[in-house]
Image: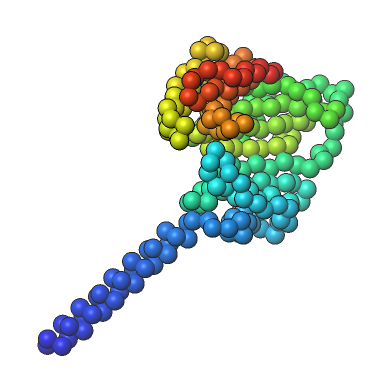
Amino acid sequence: MKKMIRNIMICCMFFFGFSILCGTDTVEAKKMTSAEQAKNAALKKIPSATVIKMESDHDDGVLVYEIELLKAGKEHNFEYRASDGKLLQYDWEIQNPPVQNQNRKNLSKKAIQKKARGKVKKATVLSTALMYDDGRSEYKVKLSKKNKSYKLIYDAKSGKLLEYEWKLLASGSGSSGAGGKDIGLEKAKSIAQKKVPGATIVKAKRDTDDGIQVYEVELVKDGYEYEVKIDAKTGKILEFDMDD
């Protein structure tokens, strides 16, 4: 009887240890240690695509892997965070789309916004701008939903979606680096909104510009886009741009 109990205990300890090891492997599998792993993750989303580019980079001090794929005349771009394998950004673009008859009347902004809301369910439309690119009339629609920002570009004549992009919005209050004090992300947002009262923030991140730690804040208001670059230590506005 004692021998049977001892054998049962040994078996239990074996399976307990095995389960811990399996759990550890699962956690480690989420990490990305090479662009090759990122490429494989991207190819799972776009099977049988041709790999155009795969490289590592640093985005605001964070190691990321950038993968570019091509399939059926559409270019796909992925950006994965190395530390946990999280997809931070994804976009696709139709290569060389045909130019519609430019004498045709443009679709209305309302019609384009309806298409954008159908593409990104329950999103908030931040701006809709008519622009011209390579002889083509296009609508650029910016939206937000939870922790993501979206950019959709439509052919203004046909309403065909030409480009689609989403990014995870930056979060957190910033941190002090080796250089000392930091105003933090929330303070930078406040400074930007004071510069453009009533505007909506669509993107905000901490970055390095010529060796200087800065916050870059992008806002929209009344069909205009604003970009404010702020010194991370002093809170001074270093650059301010407006675009329609």
Residue 242 against residue 149 in the figure, above or below? above
- x, y (%) of residue 226? 62, 19
Task: List x then y, in percent, for residue 168.
Answer: 53, 37
Q: Residue at x 21, y 84 (%)?
A: 7
Residue 87 picture location, percent across and down: 55, 47
Q: Residue at x 59, y 19 (%)?
A: 238
Q: Quadrant of residue 133?
A: top right
Quadrant the C terminus occupies = top right
The total number of labels drawn is 0
Q: Quadrant of residue 50?
A: bottom right
In the rendered image, the residue lying farthest to the left is 1
Q: Residue pushed farthest front?
A: 179
Residue 217: quadrant of the picture: top right
**Picture coordinates of residue 13 (x, y %)?**
25, 75
Q: In percent of the image, x 49 and y 19: which residue is there?
A: 235
Colour pattern of the rendering: rainbow
Front residue (pair 12, 162) = 12
Up the image or down, 231 lies above or below 160; here it is above
**Left or right of 77: which side holds 88?**
left
The residue nearer to you, when weighing 90 against 173, is 173
Question: What residue appears at the point 62 percent right and 17 percent down from the top-left corner?
Answer: 240
Q: Is residue 113 visible?
A: yes
Up the image or down, 81 lies above or below 244; here it is below
- Which image quarter holds the N terminus? bottom left
Instruction: Judge whether residue 124 can be spotted in this image.
Output: no
